[in-house]
Amino acid sequence: MIGLNRVKTWILIAALGGLFIVIGSVIGGSQGAIIALAIALVFNFSMYWFSDKIAIATTRSKPVTEQEAPELYRIVRELTETNRMPMPRVYVSEIMQPNAFATGRNPEHAAVSVTQGILQILDERELRGVLAHELSHVANRDILISSIAAAIGLSITFLARFALWFGGGDDENPLGVFGLLLAWILAPIAAAIIQMAVSRSREYQADESGAILSRDPDALASALRKLEASAKQVPVPATVSPAEAHLFIVNPFRGRQAARSLANLFSTHPPTEARVARLEEIKRELAV
């Protein structure tokens, strides 16, 4: 598992570099490709070391002490000790939509964040199930993958918009305005495909690992139902980009998806019903 996730990480980094070069070439020909390669190298380095800080900042997460959030700390500490892993940094986001995520490049530099909204609607068992899910992401070493995938989505979308507004004047660019429009349309789709490729299986794995860690599949299933319902009613702040949706335990943009069929095609999460069904199977296997 850990070795496979490391391979996925480097594939994502290589994909980011390749997409930067392709879009740079469309914008400015060979010179644009060279500039894009330089940007990609700097961006990849930054994402490896600072992806957690970016996720924390965009979600308006603030560090909390054990005195400020004793129950939260107690649950996280119990789960980390059970799983024999380092204690992550603990944050609370001011976002009112109930949700949670984990981030960081490895278990030694991990952080877990819960929103104000989730603390208001979940009971202790359900919160424990959610935190077990997030800490499983940490233990499985796939939080770096999710952070880099989020960065890919943000960076390619920005590059495509840059192409639309400022590109198109290079004689070496054979596609002209059509190439710029192509970059504008296809770059976010490429980013979504990359995210989709790593997100769905990752969520199923974390559900299973989290249910085993907490020994309470019912609690996680109940939490997922509540979070899914709340995501359709409580909007997520504009500071959170759709490219970061897969960081969370449930898709925070569920309520904004007008074109449901297209949204499902690029969904970063498995259907909640399917996740709950798998948790019910795990419950039978655990006989709890």
Image: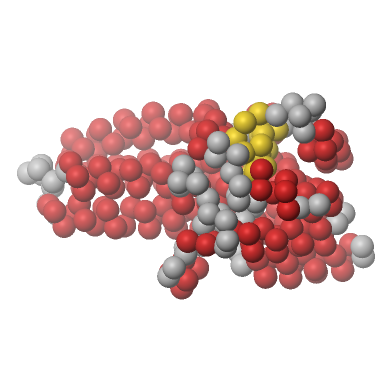
Write the residue at 74% across / 70% down: 277
**In the picture shown, does residue 69 fall above or below 95?**
above
**In the picture shown, does residue 210 fall above or below 287?**
above
- Kindly give the residue lying farthest to the bottom in the view shown: 261
- What number of labels is visible? 0
Left or right, 287 with reference to 183? right
Write the residue at 53% across / 54% down: 235
Left or right, 220 with reference to 269? right
Q: Quadrant of residue 110?
A: top right
Left or right, 99 with reference to 78? left
The percent position of residue 173, horizontal first and vertical second, equals 13, 47
Is residue 173 in view from this perspective?
yes
The percent position of residue 125, horizontal first and vertical second, equals 84, 52
- Kindly give the residue lying farthest to the right in the view shown: 287
The percent position of residue 272, horizontal first and vertical second, equals 65, 66
Which of the two residues, 113 or 30, is positioned nearer the viewer here? Answer: 113
Which of the two residues, 44 or 133, is positioned nearer the viewer here? Answer: 133
**In the picture shown, does residue 180 fall above or below 151?**
below
**In the picture shown, does residue 220 fall above or below 66?**
below
- Kindly give the residue lying farthest to the left in the view shown: 171
The percent position of residue 249, horizontal first and vertical second, equals 64, 52
Write the residue at 60% across / 35% down: 61
Write the residue at 74% across / 26% down: 65
Is residue 7 in view from this perspective?
no
